[in-house]
Image (tube, rainbow, N blue to C red):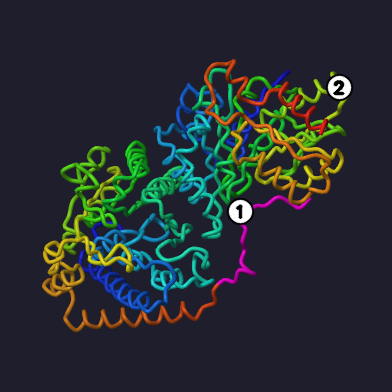
């Protein structure tokens, strides 16, 4: 039997609905027999009547309702149809949910699922990686799973954590990443990065869909050049496990951070800044970033492939890093 | 509660809240002018009747109440600790519900049904909806939510989203729109182009109510019907109360943009004066009792302010700076 990344998300929600009567699902087009733009909630409305609710196209109000419901003791899981539309809910998440615990001492237990990242033909407004926008605000946890096991475990943990959690689920991984079962072969607590591949010549830090690309790049490099890069899967960008990154850089002396997001600011910049501040002495070469281009995400698949970091581009950047 | 509420008892409770709010505003304005308050001071002059009415038909613990910038009178009606909490909020007491981490009008007690407002107008309307949805999902019936907004807030996208959603879900919410004719310095004519804000509610599919927000008894009676209808399952209600903001947006603002003729037209309509005249005429309050209520309110304000100013404020070295309740274990 083989299960996919989106199966894991579906299963996590089904198990949460079964185990926790305070959980309900809220979002656009998720109820009825339709089951969401990506079918993540398919069948759940029939199985859990009244607990899978369609919302009007009102991203701000959907998150406001989730905040209110959480204050009323519920554990809402919101599906944003596309992470790109999360900007319309950024005020509620950043200024309201994110600020709430600090201001009042009352945490807001909501989970925001955000189907994110590029796919061929997605274009500029159905492809973005907005994790840095949300991670910027104090008070939000931002999860970025790359594997089936993490997708399952981390969504369940997102609901168990009493604070607002942004769960970035990558659309490119939905049906491409597979595993034998939902059971995580290598379970780690939230806040710990995973060594996805051991190596010695450079550290490649990645998350979400850039993890499989980086693993492929490492294989390419090993086959072509004999270099063995280490790949670190961040798993969550907030909390950000600086210790695991620094430990890896201490072993390899070189750092490449790969992100599908735009170059200005962002997670890649944050990782480089932290390593420069806390581990400059560990570096044998300047730390590098590889991100998407400084342009909106193009529609045409060939342009899109050139816009995002590919395995080949990551391999090339790593080769350059090792040559420094 | 339950059944038809006798208006005389309700009116006296509402009026007491109005006296407290006015005494609080007067004192706070003096403290601001003496440089004793950090940041801004925002008063509710002209809003007292609507504000008090918006809370007086609610029950803390069962209902949801979302006052904001000019609803001090409603806060005082909603809960007995409101005056002290407002003082603590302005002076940053560690013992206040915001612990000194937020202040002035941005305070609330979400676990008691009173969410802590953010400054972004309209954002709290959907939060009220969510709090009522939670009650529905948990099988609790009979609750009502009141969301207080102003004429300016009706222009905000978040308000539109929330009101539409409330109507779609048929949630028992009363959206109370206090039209004080100015959104900061912007008059109604630059804020909206519909003939009457009451029409907005109809557009959402809500029942719409209107009243003269300076007429205490009329406002009470219209609010009573709106809250009753929402509580009895007749769906969301929209209530527009018209008044004039009889002060600046904040005490830093002299409101010189409000024409003198308009101020003059409202000179005889101060809600405190109107309410007092109406209560005396009805015989529900005597001159002596009214004077005593004023005096007691001023004493209460003095006492609450003195206590809040005496209380400890949080120190940067010792407060909990965490923005999340859960944090990863140290590796």
Residue, x 31% and y 81% (percent of image)? B298
Image location (x, y in percent) of residue B132: 41, 47
Badge 2: few (under 14), some or many (20 or more) residues near its Cα, within 10 Å? Answer: few
| Residue contact between numbered discs 2 and 1, judged by CB atoms under 8 Å | no
Q: Chain of mark 2?
A: A
Q: Chain of mark 1?
A: B
On residue B324, the disc is 1
Residue B89 drawn above or below residue A266: below
Q: Real-space Cα distance between discs 2 and 1? A: 45 Å
Location of residue B6 (image quadrant): bottom left
B102 shown above or below A273: below
| The stretch drawn in magenta includes residue B266 | no
Residue plotted at (77% across, 42% down):
A245
Q: Nearer the viewer, residue A185 or A97?
A: A97
- Name the residue: 40% across, 77% down: B35
Q: Nearer the viewer, mark 2 or mark 1?
A: 2
Mark 2 lies on residue: A225
Q: Is residue B124 above or below residue B256?
A: above
Pick the front one: B223 or A127: A127
Q: Secondary structure at mark 2?
A: helix
| Vertical position of residue A279 compared to residue B107: above or below | above
What range is drawn magenta here? B314-331
Where does residue B172 sit, x and y in percent of width and height? 33, 46
Asked whether residue B247 appears in the rendered view, the answer is yes
What main secondary structure does the magenta stretch of the protein show? loop
**Residue A291, how many percent across, how many down?**
65, 32
On the image, which quarter does residue B70 sit in? bottom left
Which quadrant would the N terminus of chain B be assigned to in this image? bottom left
């Amino acid at each position: 039997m083989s299960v996919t990344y989106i199966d894991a998300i579906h299963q996590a929600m089904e198990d949460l609905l079964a185990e926790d009567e305070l959980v309900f699902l809220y979002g656009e087009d998720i109820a009825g027999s339709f089951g969401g733009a990506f079918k993540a909630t398919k069948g759940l409305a029939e199985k859990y009547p009244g607990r899978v609710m369609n919302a009007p196209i009102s991203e701000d109000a959907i998150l406001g309702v989730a905040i209110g419901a959480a204050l009323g003791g519920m554990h809402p899981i919101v599906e944003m149809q596309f992470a790109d539309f999360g900007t319309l809910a950024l005020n509620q998440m950043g200024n309201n949910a994110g600020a709430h615990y600090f201001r009042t001492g009352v945490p807001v237990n909501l989970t925001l699922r955000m189907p994110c990242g590029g796919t061929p033909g997605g274009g500029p407004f159905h492809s973005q990686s907005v994790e840095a926008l949300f991670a910027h605000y104090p008070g939000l946890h931002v999860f970025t799973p790359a594997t089936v096991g993490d997708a399952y475990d981390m969504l369940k943990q997102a609901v168990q954590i009493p604070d607002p959690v942004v769960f970035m689920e990558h659309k490119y991984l939905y049906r491409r990443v597979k595993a034998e079962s939902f059971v995580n072969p290598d379970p780690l607590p939230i806040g710990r990065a995973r060594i996805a591949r051991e190596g010695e010549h450079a550290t490649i830090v990645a998350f979400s869909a850039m993890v499989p690309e980086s693993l492929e790049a490492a294989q390419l490099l090993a086959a072509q050049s004999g270099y063995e890069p280490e790949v670190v899967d961040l798993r969550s960008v907030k909390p950000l496990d600086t210790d695991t990154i620094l430990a890896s850089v201490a072993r390899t002396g070189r750092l490449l951070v790969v992100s599908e997001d735009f170059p200005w600011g962002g997670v890649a910049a944050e990782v480089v800044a932290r390593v420069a501040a806390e581990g400059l002495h560990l570096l044998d070469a300047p730390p590098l970033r590889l991100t998407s281009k400084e342009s909106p995400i193009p529609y045409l698949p060939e342009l899109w492939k050139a816009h995002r970091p590919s395995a080949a581009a990551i391999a090339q950047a790593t080769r350059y890093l090792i040559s420094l | 509660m339950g059944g038809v509420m006798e208006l005389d008892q309700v009116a006296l409770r509402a009026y007491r809240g109005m006296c407290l709010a006015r005494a609080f505003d007067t004192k706070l304005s003096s403290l601001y002018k003496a440089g004793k308050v950090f940041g801004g001071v925002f008063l509710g002059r002209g809003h007292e009747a609507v504000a008090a009415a918006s809370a007086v038909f609610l029950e803390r613990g069962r209902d949801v109440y979302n006052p904001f910038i000019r609803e001090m009178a409603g806060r005082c009606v909603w809960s007995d600790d409101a005056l002290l909490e407002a003082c603590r909020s302005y002076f940053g007491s560690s013992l206040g519900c915001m612990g000194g981490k937020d202040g002035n009008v941005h305070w609330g007690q979400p676990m008691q049904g009173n969410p802590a407002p953010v400054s972004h107008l309209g954002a709290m309307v959907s939060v009220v909806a969510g709090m009522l949805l939670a009650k529905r999902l948990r099988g609790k019936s009979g609750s009502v939510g009141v969301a207080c907004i102003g004429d300016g807030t009706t222009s905000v996208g978040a308000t539109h989203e929330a009101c539409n959603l409330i109507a779609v879900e048929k949630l028992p919410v009363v959206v109370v729109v206090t039209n004080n004719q100015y959104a900061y310095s912007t008059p109604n004519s630059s804020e909206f182009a519909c003939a009457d804000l009451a029409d907005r509610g109809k557009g959402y599919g809500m029942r719409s109510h209107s009243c003269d927000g300076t007429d205490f008894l009329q406002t009470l009676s219209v609010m009573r019907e709106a809250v009753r209808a929402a509580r009895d399952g007749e769906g969301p209600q929209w209530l527009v109360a018209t008044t004039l903001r009889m002060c600046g947006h904040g005490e830093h603002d002299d409101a010189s943009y409000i024409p003198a003729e308009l101020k003059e037209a409202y000179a005889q309509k101060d809600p405190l004066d109107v309410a007092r005249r109406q209560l005396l005429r009805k015989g529900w309050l005597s001159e002596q009792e009214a004077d005593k209520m004023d005096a007691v309110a001023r004493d209460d304000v003095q006492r609450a302010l003195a206590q809040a100013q005496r209380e400890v404020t949080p120190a940067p070295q010792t407060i909990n700076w965490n923005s999340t309740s859960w944090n990863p274990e140290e590796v």
